[in-house]
Image (spheres, rainbow, N blue to C red):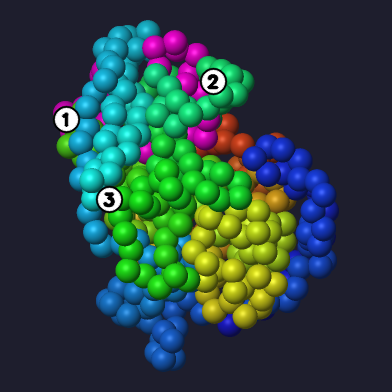
C-alpha cells in the first residue's frame, strides 16, 4: 500500500461552470490533503494476490463491482423494461449534406406504465461498410440546446418546463460539436438526461423516472438512484444503436461530462459493449480519488444531490479514511477496454489531480492485460494529452466539455480503432 504525498496549489472551484460560493470546510489547498493509503487494487478481500487476468476477472473484479453496486451507485435491477423505438423526424441532408439527422422516440413500458425519451442522432452519410463508430452521451438542457436548428424537437421533459429561457436553442452547442464529429467519420447519439430521471436538486424526480417502471428487491440502502438509472438508459440507447445499419456496433463509446461523467463511468463498467469510456470533469463519485478530500467530497455531493447515489454511500461522509475502496478501482473495471479521463485547470471542485491519480493507480490492471496505462505519477503539462490504452489530458479553463476536449477524444478513438484520417 502506498502513501501519497502532495504539493501546493490553491485555486477556486467551479461546479457546472459556475463559481462555488458559500461552501464551508471545502479544501482547495494541496498542503491540507491528508496522508492516505489507497486500498489495494490487486489484493482480494481474503488476502490473495492477483497476478493473472483469470484471477482478476473471476475473483477481484466481482468483489469491486459488488462494493460499488451496493455502497455507491446502487444495484441495477434484473428486471426488463420493454422499449419501442420510432423515428419521428429525419433529415438526410443535415450539416450541409454531410450527415443524416434522426430524432428517435424511445417508449419505455413496464407494469402498465410508460415513459418517453427522445434521442437526437447524427451519422455520416459517407462511412465504411463496417459502419461508423458512435459516441453515446446525455445532454443537460435538452436536445434543442445542442443546436440552433429549429427542426430539433423538444425532449419530452421540456413539455413540463414553464421557464422560457430553458427553451433557447443552441445554448450548449459547444458541448456537442456535431459537425466536427461527423467530419471525423463518427456518429453521435445524445438524449436529455431529464427524460430518463428528472434531476431535481433536492430529489423528487424518481416518480417521473424509469425507477417507477422497474421495481427492485434490493435493500433500501443499496437501491439504485439517479446515477444508476441514467447508466441504465445509456445501455438502452446502445441497444438501439447496435441494430442500426449505419453503426459499427463494435465501436461504441460512452462519454459524459460532470455528473454525467460519473454516469458514463458506471455505464461503461457495467456494459462491456462500450469499447471506450470517457469521463470529463467527473469529480467525486466519478474519476477523482475520494480519500484526497479535495474539492467535492462525499459529504458535499450526497448532501446537495441526495438522489444521485444509493443511501449506503452516505455512511462515508467525513469518513473517507475508512472507505474500503476508491475510484481508481472503479476505473480499473473498464479494462481491457479503453479509458480516457479529462480535467480542467480551474475546475478544482472536481479535483484534477485526484482524477489523474485515479487513472494512474488503475493502470496495474491494464498491465495484467498486456496494455499500457498511465506510466508516470506526474500529471502531463496543461494542453498535452497522454494516449496510451488509458488516456488523459488537462486543459486550461473552467468546468465544461469543449471542442478542445472533443478533439482529443476523437484522436484517442482513432488510435483505439485504428482509424486514419477519420476513416
Q: Is the residue marked by circle 2 packed among few (<14), some (14-19), or many (20+) residues within 10 Å?
A: some
Quadrant in the picture for residue 314: bottom right
Locate residue 213, reporting x and y percent. Answer: 31, 50
Judge whether 373 appears above or below 51 on screen.
Answer: above
Mark 3 lies on a secondary structure that is: loop
Q: Is the residue marked by circle 3 packed among few (<14), some (14-19), or many (20+) residues within 10 Å?
A: many
Q: Is residue 137 magenta?
A: yes
Locate residue 72, reporting x and y percent. Answer: 49, 66
Q: Residue at x 54, y 20 (%)?
A: 167
Judge whether 326 appears above or below 189 on screen.
Answer: below
Locate residue 355, reporting x and y percent. Answer: 60, 57
Q: Pointer 1 and pointer 3: residues touching (CB < 8 Å)?
A: no
Q: Which residue is mark 2?
A: 167
Q: Which residue is mark 3?
A: 273
Q: Residue at x 61, y 46 (%)?
A: 201
Quadrant in the picture for residue 27: bottom right
Side of 21 relative to 265 (left or right): right
Quarter of the image with the C terminus in it? top left
Mark drawn on residue 245: 1
Quadrant in the picture for residue 247: top left
> Does residue 93 appear anywhere in the picture?
yes
> Does residue 230 appear anywhere in the picture?
no
Mark 1 lies on a secondary structure that is: loop
Q: CA distance from mark 3 to mark 2?
A: 34 Å
Side of 415 relative to 301 (left or right): left
Q: CA distance from mark 1 to mark 2?
A: 33 Å
Q: Residue at x 44, y 91 (%)?
A: 47
Mark 2 lies on a secondary structure that is: helix
Locate residue 76, reporting x and y percent. Answer: 35, 61
Q: Mark 1, mark 2: which one is toward the viewer?
A: 2
Amino acid at each position: 500500500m502506498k502513501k501519497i504525498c502532495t504539493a501546493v496549489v490553491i485555486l477556486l472551484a467551479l461546479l457546472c461552470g459556475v463559481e462555488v460560493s458559500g461552501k464551508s470546510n471545502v479544501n482547495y489547498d494541496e498542503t491540507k490533503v491528508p496522508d492516505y493509503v489507497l486500498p489495494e487494487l490487486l489484493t482480494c478481500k481474503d488476502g490473495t494476490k492477483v497476478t493473472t487476468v483469470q484471477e482478476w476477472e473471476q475473483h477481484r473484479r466481482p468483489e469491486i463491482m459488488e462494493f460499488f453496486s451496493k455502497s455507491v451507485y446502487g444495484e441495477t435491477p434484473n428486471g426488463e423494461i420493454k422499449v419501442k423505438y420510432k423515428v419521428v423526424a429525419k433529415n438526410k441532408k443535415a450539416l450541409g449534406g454531410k450527415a443524416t439527422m434522426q430524432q428517435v422516440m424511445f417508449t419505455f413500458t413496464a407494469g402498465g406504465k410508460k415513459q418517453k425519451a427522445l434521442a437526437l442522432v447524427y451519422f455520416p452519410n459517407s462511412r465504411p461498410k463496417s459502419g461508423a463508430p458512435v459516441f453515446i452521451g446525455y445532454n443537460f438542457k435538452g436536445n434543442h440546446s445542442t443546436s440552433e436548428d429549429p427542426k430539433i424537437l423538444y425532449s419530452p421533459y421540456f413539455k413540463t418546463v414553464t421557464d422560457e429561457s430553458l427553451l433557447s436553442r443552441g445554448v450548449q452547442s459547444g458541448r456537442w460539436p456535431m459537425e466536427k464529429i461527423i467530419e471525423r467519420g463518427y456518429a453521435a447519439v445524445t438524449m436529455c438526461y431529464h427524460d430518463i430521471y428528472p434531476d431535481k436538486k433536492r430529489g423528487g424526480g424518481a416518480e417521473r423516472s424509469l425507477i417507477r417502471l422497474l421495481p427492485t428487491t434490493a435493500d433500501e440502502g443499496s437501491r439504485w438512484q439517479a446515477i444508476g438509472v441514467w447508466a441504465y438508459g445509456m445501455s438502452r440507447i446502445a441497444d438501439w444503436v447496435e441494430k442500426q445499419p449505419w453503426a459499427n456496433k463494435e465501436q461504441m463509446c460512452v462519454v459524459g461530462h460532470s455528473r454525467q461523467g460519473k454516469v458514463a463511468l458506471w455505464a461503461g463498467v457495467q456494459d462491456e459493449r462500450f469499447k471506450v469510456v470517457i469521463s470529463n470533469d467527473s469529480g467525486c463519485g466519478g474519476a477523482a480519488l475520494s480519500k484526497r478530500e479535495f474539492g467535492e467530497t462525499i459529504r458535499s455531493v450526497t448532501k446537495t444531490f441526495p438522489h444521485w447515489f444509493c443511501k449506503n454511500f452516505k455512511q462515508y461522509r467525513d469518513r473517507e479514511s475508512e472507505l474500503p475502496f476508491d475510484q481508481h478501482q472503479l476505473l480499473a473495471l473498464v479494462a481491457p477496454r479503453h479509458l480516457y479521463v479529462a480535467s480542467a485547470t480551474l475546475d478544482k471542485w472536481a479535483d484534477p489531480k485526484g482524477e489523474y491519480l485515479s487513472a494512474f493507480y488503475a493502470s496495474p490492471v491494464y498491465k495484467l492485460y498486456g496494455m499500457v496505462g498511465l506510466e508516470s505519477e506526474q500529471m502531463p503539462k496543461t494542453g498535452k494529452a497522454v494516449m496510451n490504452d488509458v488516456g488523459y489530458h488537462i486543459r486550461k479553463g473552467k468546468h465544461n466539455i469543449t471542442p478542445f476536449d472533443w478533439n482529443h477524444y476523437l484522436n484517442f478513438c482513432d488510435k483505439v480503432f485504428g482509424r486514419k484520417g477519420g476513416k
